[in-house]
Image (tube, helix red, strand yellow):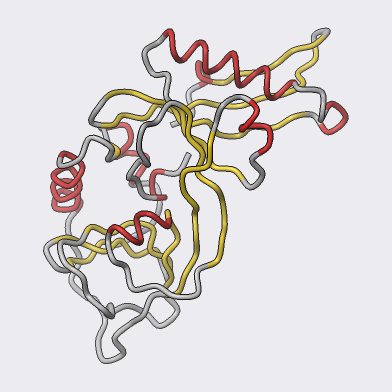
């Protein structure tokens, strides 16, 4: 997903001071970008280089009809200065589980793709996946097991993606399983979590609503 044509840098006197990368995103309402890898040379921090680079990226993206932007951040000050706002939190939280059994059956990729694409089509603020993004999705080792009329995507003991059509108070998963994803998605899907811990802020620019996406698509 990291295209060299989307790599940005702020130069001063021939030296790179700040860098970032943009990643294409598509929602039902249109195109946007994810911003990743924002960094500034240690000796040059506090001089506004990252903020100016972000402003230029946002101007360019707006010209290319993909103006809305998302990013994940621990600290928000730089991004707030250029117009980003916090819209959600990335959390880690244990999942309440049923001890007597675990998920065993595994869905094929084609089945997962069909379920996800149908789910994404039902709301314009859900992230769409094109062929390139599905290829990116396949890079991590994970299994997807049927659950309700959807699935749970399992990566060891971490669950970053699931699609459900009904609430289930306890899940048949490994005892150490935890949700790692957006707090809003955990609430929307009624995932039975507890004792959540903050990991990152999700910040947006030009979004009217909170986007619906999973950390399997993190940029």
155 vs 197, nearest the viewer: 197
Residue drawn at 32 percent across, 78 percent down: 173
195 vs 173, nearest the viewer: 195
In the displayed image of the protein, which residue is found farthest to the right? 43
The correct choice, above or below, for 4 with respect to 104 in the image is above
Please indicate whether residue 130 sits to the left or right of residue 50 in the image: left
The correct choice, above or below, for 72 with respect to 7 in the image is below
The correct choice, above or below, for 12 with respect to 168 in the image is above
Residue drawn at 39 percent across, 18 percent down: 66
Question: Which percent across, then down, holds residue 39?
Answer: 70, 32
Please indicate whether residue 71 sits to the left or right of residue 15 in the image: left
In the displayed image of the protein, which residue is found farthest to the bottom? 100
149 vs 166, nearest the viewer: 166
208 vs 189, nearest the viewer: 208
Question: Which percent across, then down, holds residue 137?
Answer: 35, 45
Location of the N terminus (image quadrant)? top left
Q: Quadrant of residue 143?
A: bottom left
Please indicate whether residue 75 sits to the left or right of residue 123 in the image: right
Residue drawn at 50 percent across, 74 percent down: 195
Residue drawn at 46 percent across, 28 percent down: 69
Q: Quadrant of residue 7?
A: top right
* Count of all numbered marks drawn on residues in the image: 0
Question: Which percent across, then down, holds residue 48?
Answer: 76, 22
Please indicate whether residue 169 sits to the left or right of residue 36 in the image: left
Q: Quadrant of residue 73?
A: top right
Question: Which percent across, then down, holds residue 65?
Answer: 36, 13
């Amino acid at each position: 997903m990291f295209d060299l044509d989307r790599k940005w840098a702020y130069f001063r006197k021939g030296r790179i001071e700040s860098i970032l990368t943009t990643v294409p995103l598509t929602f039902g309402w249109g195109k946007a970008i994810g911003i990743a890898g924002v960094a500034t040379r240690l000796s040059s921090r506090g001089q506004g280089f990252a903020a100016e680079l972000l402003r230029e990226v946002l101007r360019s993206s707006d010209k290319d009809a993909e103006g809305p932007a998302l990013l994940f951040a621990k600290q928000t000050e730089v991004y707030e200065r250029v117009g980003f706002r916090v819209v959600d939190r990335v959390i880690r939280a244990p999942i309440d589980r049923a001890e007597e059994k675990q998920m065993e059956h595994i869905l094929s990729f084609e089945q997962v793709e069909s379920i996800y694409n149908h789910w994404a089509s039902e709301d314009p603020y859900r992230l769409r996946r094109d062929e390139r993004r599905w290829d990116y999705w396949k890079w991590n080792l994970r299994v997807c097991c049927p659950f309700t009329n959807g699935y749970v995507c399992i990566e060891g003991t971490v669950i970053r993606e699931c699609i459900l059509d009904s609430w289930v108070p306890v899940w048949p998963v490994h005892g150490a399983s935890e949700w790692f994803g957006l707090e809003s998605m955990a609430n929307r899907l009624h995932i039975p979590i507890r004792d959540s811990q903050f990991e990152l802020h999700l910040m947006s620019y030009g979004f009217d609503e909170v986007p619906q996406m999973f950390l399997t698509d993190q940029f």
